[in-house]
Image (cartoon, rainbow, N blue to C red):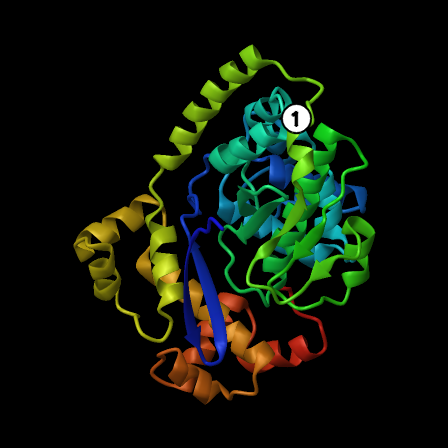
Amino acid sequence: MRRRQETAGKEGGITWVARNPAPSYNARVHKADTLFAIVEQLRSEGVDARHALADTDLTPTQLASHNCRMSYRQLEVVIRNALRLSTNPAIALNAGSRVCVTSYGMYGYAMLSSRTLAEVVDLTNKYIRIGTPCCMAVMTKSETSVLCCLSPMHWYDETTEIYRFAVEFALAAHQKVIRDLLGPQFVFKKIMLRYGRPKHSALYSEFFGDQIDYRQAENGYEFDAAHLHAPLPFADPRSNAMVSEICETMLLEIEQVSDMAGAVRRILVENLGHMRRLGDVAKTLNIHPRSLRRALAAEGTSYSEVFSSIRAELAIRYLRETDMTSEDIAYRLGFSDAANFRHSFKRLIGVPPSEYRRNAKHGTVQNV
């Protein structure tokens, strides 16, 4: 099986998994199709698009433009807004099902003009990042089946709702696109998920059937290899060659974007509890600390902001999933004392740790 590089870090019984490479987290160079599908689903549920886009610096008018570009940071904000604003447990599944093959622009037309699904699989492995997916996809063909492994782009903890949202969206979107190409009768043979069975697992059966395995080594799906050789109805080799060249240019533009903040984030995630100083991270990246500071500043952030974000995420995990005291959490995360931890947490999250934990037990905090 072809796999993306995977590393893991563990801190306080909580495991974080990071897969590389991921596209830029901060740069606004990505097509907004995924974000658009989520906002449209929220609108169908009665949520004002302005509320769905809160804290993104994007307006509904901008999002409606075919030239709209977004960052993965903005996509994360919208996903968190969706988890907070929607009462629909199928929000991610329904949003993903709004995606059609032409939603992906040139990448979609490259799939549509392919001769067979086998060519589409090759295109997916090469150009999927053009479509701003929630999950990276790696598809492997064998004589009997096709396996697609899905890895959320910037969300590494499978216990969180944002991780599950990314996987659900990706599964629904992939199924919809393949049905656009082969017809509505297409079904997955099997689905694999890294996380445990969620409360709304019955919805999975409605969308994908009953062959669903939880707590697996990978997220993904499998389908019969016989589908690979069926001729596609809109095959056009000349058009396919033209749009594939455009896809190559678009992919190069995305890959050339610097994402130092994303690199720092991945290093910290992989080394939680062992690496806290900027100098240590710079050494791992094989650059001078001053160069790292300048690169982060050019992306509109700083080492302290990235580090604080990671530390806040882990603090939330501890508060929600363990009985650790504020003193224990402060020590584990490297704060000088519990008071310093409480002050930092309230500044970042808006409420003291004790209030956050109390609200979490009653289900009244924003999903993380």
Residue occupying image coordinates x 45% and y 76%: 343
For disc 1, the marked residue is 102
Residue occupying image coordinates x 33% and y 83%: 336
Residue occupying image coordinates x 63% and y 44%: 145
Q: Amino acid at mark 1?
A: Thr
Give the image location of residue 49, x and y in percent. 70, 41
Circle 1 packing at 10 Å, graded few (<14), some (14-19), many (20+), is: some
Q: Foreground: 231 or 351?
A: 231
Q: Is residue 347 visible?
A: no
Furthest toward the top, the residue is 238
Give the image location of residue 91, x and y in percent. 74, 51
Furthest toward the front, the residue is 143
Would you identify the image quadrant in which residue 299 lies?
A: top left
Q: Foreground: 162 or 175?
A: 175
Would you identify the image quadrant in which residue 355 lies?
A: bottom right
Would you identify the image quadrant in which residue 320 lies?
A: bottom right
